[in-house]
Structures are given as structure tokens and as C-alpha cells.
Image (tube, rainbow, N blue to C red):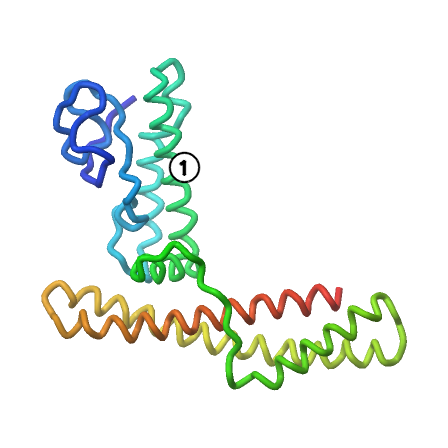
Amino acid sequence: METVKKEIPMARSMCWHCQSDVGGEYFCGQCVKVQPLSKDIDYFTCLGLPRKLNIDTGRLETKFYEMSRAFHPDFYEGKSEIERAVSLTNSAVLNQAYRTLKDPAARVEYLLRLEAGSAKDIPGKAPTDLFETLLEIQEQLEQLRAMKHSKSGEARSIASQLHAEKGALESKRGALERRLTELFHVWDRLVDRSSQDQIAKAEKGPVLTEMRDIVSQRNYLNTMLTNIEEALA
């Protein structure tokens, strides 16, 4: 197997096998043993990307496949138990990082948790401008569920109302996603500036807060739309 030299955070500064300085490389330069990724590594660093929201997907793919070849468990059949364990753990981290960063929705939620230092998922929050509409939808859903497979005129009327409300929620979700896309660009510009600009660092906070609020509302609407679709099925 061809070894790949690339500096990223490893779990230890010395090789677990020969105690040589590994300097952040995937493999020890002396004994060529695979090295464990740090448990504290973030997914952006793992895949060689800046902590931005508009990412180079081609670069992401290239880096993922490069690291996959380095860590894939198939290459470690017949190796020591430690090497097999390291390859499995590294592959699991790598796969999770790739799945998260390739999906824009998962990517922004991950960045928000990362910046907040939290592992918790972002809870859903009802958009305040749709509060009354959402209350009506909840009532309609309860009524329709109580009727189950009824084909009465009342059931058809409630279903028709839910179809209309579904459109309103989708429209709101679309508006939130358009604003979120705008904030992706704002965030990325701040990342470019923040290494040298203290004002840019200070401006990150409000952008993160707004993105978190939008994601929270979107999560709520996604759940509500799923509930409507299930009730109408």
C-alpha cells in the first residue's frame, strides 16, 4: 500500500509502535504504521477544508478517496490487532465527516454545533409569524388522525385545508433556505477576513445566531411537513 503524507491532527505526537515523532502524518515515517486520528479532530480539518459553508465539492471528494485508500480496513487484513482497530476507527470518522460535509443542511448544523462547542442537535422552533397557522394545522392533524381512513365530507374538507397549509409551510421554508444561502456567503467572507480582522471575528456571532435561528425554524417546518404528508397518505 502506498503511504500518504499529510499533516492533520493525530491522536498522539509519537508513533504508538516505535515512539518516533509522527508530525501529524497518517503513517509513521520510521515503521510505516498507520496512526490514529485525534478524537478531537473536526470534520473540516479531517478533510483538509477551511471552516466554510460553501465548499469545493471536488476537493472534498478527492480528499475523501485519498484518505479512504489510506485507512480502508481491507488493506489491514493480516496486520496486527492495533492496526486493524486504528483503520476501523479512522474509517468511521472519515465516513461520518464526508457524509456530514457533503450535505449542505448537515454541514451548517455541524458548523453551528462546532462553533458553539456543543454536540447537541439543534431543536426545532416554530416560526412566530406562522404561530396561529401552526396551531390550526395541529388541530386539523388531530382531527384527521381521529377519523383515520374515513372518506366523509368532513375528512375530505380537512385534507383539502391541510394541502393548502402545506403549500404555505413550503413557501416559508423556501424563504428561510434562501436567507440561509445568503448567510453562507456572509459567513465565508468573515472566515476569510477573521484571521487578520478583529471586527470580522466580532461579526461572526450575530451571523451564527441568525443561522441557528433559521435552522431551528427549518427543522420545525420539516417535522410539520412530514406529519402532514403522513396524515394525507
Residue at point 41%, 73% (across, down): 213
Residue at point 17%, 19% (across, down): 18
Is 163 situated left or right of 72 in this image? right
Position of residue 40 measured from the top left corner of the image (x, y, whole percent):
28, 44
Is 219 situated left or right of 11 in this image? right
Label 1 crowd (10 A; few <14 / some 14-19 / many >=20) = some
Q: Quadrant for the N terminus, please.
A: top left
Quadrant of the rendered image containing residue 96: top left
In the image, residue 137 sits, relative to residue 184, either above or below, namely below
Residue at point 53%, 76% (across, down): 126
Q: What's the residue type where badge 1 is placed? A: Ala
Position of residue 94 measured from the top left corner of the image (x, y, whole percent):
36, 40
Q: In the displayed orientation, state which residue is furthest to the left.
A: 196
Mark 1 lies on residue = 92
In the image, residue 63 sits, relative to residue 117, either above or below, namely above
Residue at point 78%, 72% (across, down): 144
